[in-house]
Image: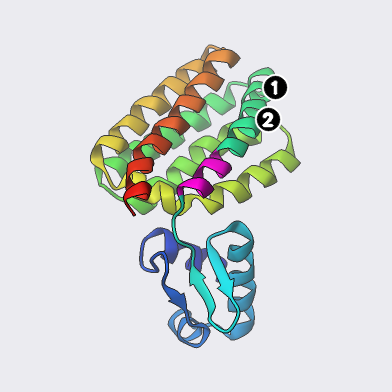
């Protein structure tokens, strides 16, 4: 239930500000109210939905301040993960990164935003998992889930999709070279480009 509800939000089937009527959602997804409530609680914890007394749940509205806060925390944690991955990981990580980068490129070519979002997640979490720090990975995963909707907006632009492909190639090369400083810098730039692209959209909204 959680995956289906999250996917509906990322895909734009449930849009920012939309009310989430539990009876209607339970019927739509063919589930009882219990797993639906649990999924909504999880998404509330991630910041994807908000609860208002007497009004119920609604899809969270996109916010530049929210995005900047989440990405700043990710920057600190993912830099640590990248450096640890360079020190610990074997060449099998390169193979996994290559495969995920190919999935991103294939989804980009089809303009399949949802598939690209999932493939991009796999690419980045290859590095996070290679750090061998499970607590850090869990925290980053929560932060990542909280911004999937923003990422889907970013991938809606073909120019941004091509930029992502180029930047993934650079990140992959830096890892192959085991250049931790370059790897961290490229990941930071990758994140910053997304923020700058989204800034104009969010400020206009």
- Render colour scheme: rainbow
Q: CA distance from mark 1 to mark 2?
A: 7 Å
**Residue under the image location 53 percent in, 66 percent down:** 49
Residue at position x 36%, y 68% in the image: 13
State the residue position of label 1.
Answer: 88
Measured from the top left, where is residue 140 in percent x and y?
A: 63, 43
Give the quarter of the image for residue 195: top left
Instruction: State the residue in front, 143 or 86.
Output: 143
Which corner quadrant holds the C terminus?
A: bottom left
| Image position of 99 with respect to 44: above or below | above
Looking at the rendering, the stretch of residues picked out in magenta corresponds to: 64-71
> Of residues 26 and 194, which is closer to you in this image?
194
Q: Considering depth in this image, is 183 or 86 the residue closer to the camera?
A: 183
- For label 1, the SS is helix
Q: Is residue 102 left or right of residue 147?
A: left
Q: Secondary structure at mark 2?
A: loop
User: Mark 2 = which residue?
Assistant: 131
- The verdict on residue 83 being magenta is no
Instruction: Please say if 143 is above or below 170.
Output: below
Q: Residue 69 colored magenta?
A: yes
- x%, y% of residue 54? 57, 84
* Rendered image: mark on residue 136: none
* Main SS of residues in magenta: helix
Indicate the quadrant where residue 76 lies: top right
Residue 77 rendering spot, x and y as whole percentages = 65, 33
Q: Earlier in the sequence, mark 1 or mark 2?
A: 1
193 is higher (above) or lower (below) than 178: below
- For the residues labelled 1 and 2, say whether their Cβ atoms are less than 8 Å apart: yes
């Amino acid at each position: 239930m959680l995956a289906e509800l999250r996917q509906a939000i990322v895909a734009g089937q449930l849009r920012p500000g939309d009310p989430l009527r539990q009876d209607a959602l339970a019927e739509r997804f063919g589930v009882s109210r219990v797993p639906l409530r649990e999924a909504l609680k999880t998404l509330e914890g991630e910041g994807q939905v908000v609860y208002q007394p007497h009004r119920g749940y609604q899809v969270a509205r996109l916010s530049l301040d929210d995005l900047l806060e989440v990405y700043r925390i990710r920057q600190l944690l993912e830099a640590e993960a990248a450096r640890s991955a360079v020190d610990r990981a074997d060449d099998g990580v390169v193979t996994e990164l290559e495969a995920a980068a190919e999935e991103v490129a294939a989804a980009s070519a089809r303009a399949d935003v949802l598939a690209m979002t999932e493939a991009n997640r796999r690419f980045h979490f290859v590095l996070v998992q290679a750090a061998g720090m499970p607590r850090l990975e869990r925290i980053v995963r929560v932060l990542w889930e909280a911004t999937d909707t923003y990422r889907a907006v970013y991938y809606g632009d073909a120019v941004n999709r091509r930029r992502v492909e180029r930047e993934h190639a650079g990140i992959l090369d830096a890892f192959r070279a085991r250049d931790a400083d370059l790897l961290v810098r490229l990941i930071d730039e990758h994140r910053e480009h997304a923020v700058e692209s989204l800034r104009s959209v969010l400020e206009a909204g």
